Amino acid sequence: MSSGSIRIGIIGGGAAGLFAACQIKSLSAGRDIRVSLIEKNSIPGKKLTVTGHGRCNITNRKDVSLLKEGYHEAVNFIYPALKEFGPEDTICFMENELGLKLKEEDNNRMFPVCDSAVVVRDTILDYLKGSTEIICDAKVMEVKKDGVFKVKTSKGSFDFDAIVLSCGGSSFPKTGSTGDSYKIAGMFGHTIVLLRGALAPVRLEDGSLGFASSLSGVSVTAKVSLLCGEKVTASRTGEVLFADFGLTGPAVMAISREVPADISGMNVSIEMDLIPSLSDEEFDRELQKLIGEHADTKMATLLSRFAPASVAAEICSKAGISGLYAQGFTKENRKKLIRETKHLRLGLKDVPQIEKAYVTRGGVSLKEVDRKTMQSKKVEGLYIIGEALDIDGISGGYNLQACMSEAYLAARSILEI
């Protein structure tokens, strides 16, 4: 870019776009930089305000060497960005530049002390006043390059020397993430990797739905495994929440990205181990001990020592042993109970709905973007960041950190720092 005046257009005012504007302001002190952020909603940061259940899990304080492992297939692509602007840099920026004090919670997750994602968004907007022109209710209809980038919107046309494409993925469309990034990237010949839901709840087939729906609102700590046929393709231990449509909660959402893109004709299921701290053999020994000590007690009551009473009752029903007492409880009955408690199979109805997902898996192919600058390899001056890219991180501050790190690289490259 020229050392003179630079016109920068940011398309999309979600987390990535707002972070890009922040980084450009922070790095361009004293220079003639004109930044316009184009947002189709009435106010930027709509999706940002629902992150972290409304509390905004800004980053994760793990060392970068560990943090990078949370980005699945994109681990090598994202590493340079994390090294250049990692969690400690994000914490420093939030606290010193924005004045937002942070606190660390379990698993190194960083939240604002105020516990409000809305406050985070509003603080960013206050920071950008005077440095960034924010154009809301502006739908982008066409972007082309003819010497400069020409952006046609419902609020008029604009010329820019550089473009930051940051209008999100296709998850949570009610927040404005409706796939606009892919349409614009496609205008410049970029390949879009198949879009799928990640960090999403799963719906269960009719034969399994009754079990989950009868426990709607109940949560358990369990090991959940995704099975394609009899092959385990992903596992996670954590909280699982039963719902009237199926299963949700951190453990289920963590493995949802691994559900095949098309499961028609496949036997795809979730297997739950409701007592992950004990092996089958250890659980069997515990059962035998309890049976010997409490002969006049119902098995559902004894099982409730290991799981919520409502879950224990449903497990006994599914095992066909409802109403049975410990006295006379046979070895065959124990096998049934162990199977349903430690190897509970629940079939999936379909692939996770991208509309219900917190993050999009898929997007602009990483092969077509320079991982050291975030600049398109196809179009000079076009930078692609955030959920527009084929990057999805695990839950716990990973996705917002990726946005901040990518925004830093893009800003530095645009400003030739």
Image (cartoon, helix red, strand yellow):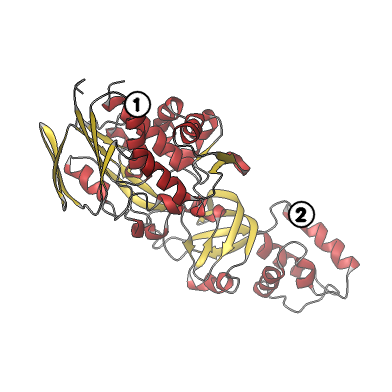
- Residue 48 versus residue 312: which sits nearer the camera? 48
- Quadrant assignment, res 173: bottom left
Of 298 and 243, nearer the camera is 243
Foreground label between 1 and 2 = 1
Q: Please tell me whether mark 2 sits on a helix, a strand or a loop.
A: helix
Q: Is residue 391 visible?
A: no
Q: Is residue 408 visible?
A: yes
Dividing the picture into quadrants, the one containing residue 309 is: bottom right
Determine the residue positioned at 53% across, 51% down: 231
Compared with residue 333, is residue 221 higher up or lower down, i.e. above or below?
above
Percent x, y of residue 50: 45, 54
Residue drawn at x 84%, y 63% as measured from the top left: 288
360 shown above or below 211: above
Which residue type carries mark 1?
Leu
The residue indicated by pointer 2 is: 281
Instruction: State which tag comes first along the sequence, 1 or 2.
Output: 1
Q: Which residue is mark 1?
A: 27
Task: Name the amino acid, label 2.
Answer: Glu
